[in-house]
């Protein structure tokens, strides 16, 4: 078999991505049809920049979801004779099979590794960002609303973390040697409590006049929350539903710890501004509790800047994860991590450029999409 032409490679990749195209068509059709009912997301289609960003982000999200259907070969599998082969090279001994983007230095399919790599990135980055926001919101709201000693102490601690160079702190927290000290476990034990605290207070403040409903919601949060907490933080889930590998726990905790102080400062600043508004004074006059005011009056009115920062922060964390993988500190040495794939390819970049370019373009397009999406959301939130 001869190597495929550029047109044949393009067509082959587009065909493999059919599940993504179909899902995107359905999502955009429904979104445009119901756009008037979708709030900020619906208004996003009025922004050309935001729409382009949404297309890029949605493409990679759906690629991660349908990765098992898209890949053409096992991303960890090695096929004899395919080491460093060029794009569109036929797989030896397998009729009609090709390496669309070539083979790497271990004879693995680059196309399949790039596709599967999107799943590892889009599993860690959004989840870690969400945890960082829950920590930042839980601490930032009372710091800004109450001020005083609480604000002083929390602000000092956040500034203490932010004063340390972020990259060095990140590398320090994810090195394998740090695992033996137990620091990631201690950090996980503290940081993973904040989602439970946030949701308990959320339902308690919202339904405090309806004790039956409040108790049901709080009980559900406590049962599910501590079940997940025991598995993720301590690997003690008796059913094995919640589990996080030690190396992944290191990375996840490091991302949450490094980003939480920044989110805290943003939430605190927004709270200091919004708490002076008339509707907050009206809620205080009605006799609403502090946590009700913070979570149901202040937080919803701070959603615009927080949503924008959430998108930007996912992009920032994606770059950090790529940097970790590049320096060999990714999830695992054999994982199809984009940063690790780029690092492996750069050593032979002058001879085989196809090894590093596809994962680099993937990483760049995802971060670009997140930045454009954030710009579109910022533009539309200012119009509200």
Image: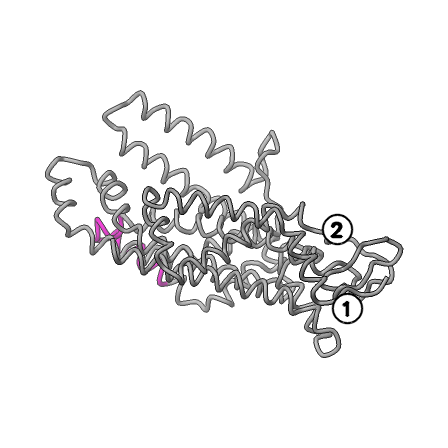
Numbered circle sitting on residue 380: none
> Looking at this view, is 351 or 202 the one in front?
351
Look at the numbered disc 1 and give the secondary structure of its residue.
loop
**Quadrant in the picture for residue 36:** top left
Task: Say which quarter of the image contains residue 313.
Answer: bottom left
In three-dimensional space, the C-alpha distance between marks 2 and 1, rounded to whole angstroms, equals 18 Å
**Mark 2 Cα shell of 10 Å, populated few (<14), some (14-19), many (≥20):** some
Residue 240: name its quadrant: top right
Residue 177, percent from left and from top? 62, 58
- Residue shown at the point (83%, 58%) measured from the top left: 91
For the record, the magenta segment spans 142-159
User: In the drawing, does residue 46 fall left or right of residue 146?
Assistant: right
Q: Name the disc covering residue 74, or none.
A: 2
Mark closer to the chain start, 2 or 1: 2
User: Is 124 in front, or is 370?
Assistant: 370
Which quarter of the rendering shows the N terminus?
Answer: bottom right
Q: Residues within 10 Å of mark 1 (few under 14, many from 20)?
A: some
- Drawn side of residue 316 relative to residue 249, left or right: left
Q: Nearer the viewer, residue 287 or 112?
A: 112
Dot 2: what SS? loop
Q: Position of residue 372 (x, y in %)?
A: 42, 62
Q: Which residue is mark 1?
A: 86
Q: Position of residue 25 (x, y in %)?
A: 51, 47
């Amino acid at each position: 078999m001869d190597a495929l032409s550029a047109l044949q490679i393009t067509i082959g990749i587009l065909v493999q991505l059919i599940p993504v195209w179909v899902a995107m068509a359905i999502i955009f059709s429904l979104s445009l049809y119901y756009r008037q009912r979708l709030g900020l997301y619906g208004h996003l289609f009025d922004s050309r920049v935001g729409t382009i960003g949404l297309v890029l982000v949605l493409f990679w999200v759906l690629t991660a979801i349908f990765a098992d259907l898209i890949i053409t070969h096992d991303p960890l599998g090695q096929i004899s004779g395919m080491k460093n082969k060029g794009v569109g090279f036929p797989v030896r001994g397998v009729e009609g099979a090709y390496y669309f983007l070539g083979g790497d230095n271990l004879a693995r399919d680059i196309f399949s590794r790039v596709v599967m790599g999107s799943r590892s990135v889009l599993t860690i980055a959004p989840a870690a960002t969400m945890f960082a926001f829950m920590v930042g919101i839980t601490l930032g709201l009372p710091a800004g609303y109450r001020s005083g000693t609480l604000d002083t102490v929390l602000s000092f601690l956040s500034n203490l973390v932010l004063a340390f160079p972020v990259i060095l702190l990140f590398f320090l927290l994810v090195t394998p040697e740090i695992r033996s000290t137990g620091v990631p476990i201690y950090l996980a034990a503290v940081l993973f409590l904040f989602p439970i605290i946030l949701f308990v207070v959320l339902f308690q403040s919202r339904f405090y006049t309806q004790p039956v409903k409040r108790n049901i919601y709080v009980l559900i949060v406590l049962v599910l929350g501590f079940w997940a907490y025991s598995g993720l933080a301590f690997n003690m889930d008796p059913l094995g539903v919640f589990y996080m590998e030690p190396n992944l726990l290191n990375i996840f905790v490091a991302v949450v710890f490094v980003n939480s102080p920044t989110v805290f400062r943003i939430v605190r600043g927004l709270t200091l501004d919004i708490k002076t508004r008339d509707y907050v004074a009206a809620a205080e006059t009605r006799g609403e509790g502090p946590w009700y005011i913070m979570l149901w009056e202040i937080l919803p009115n701070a959603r615009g800047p927080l949503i924008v920062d959430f998108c930007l922060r996912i992009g920032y964390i994606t770059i950090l994860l790529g940097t970790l993988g590049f320096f060999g500190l990714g999830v695992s040495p054999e994982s199809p991590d984009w940063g690790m794939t780029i690092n492996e390819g750069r050593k032979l970049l002058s001879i085989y450029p196809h090894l590093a370019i596809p994962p680099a373009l993937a990483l760049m397009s995802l971060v670009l999409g997140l930045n454009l999406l954030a710009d579109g959301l910022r533009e539309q939130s200012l119009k509200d």
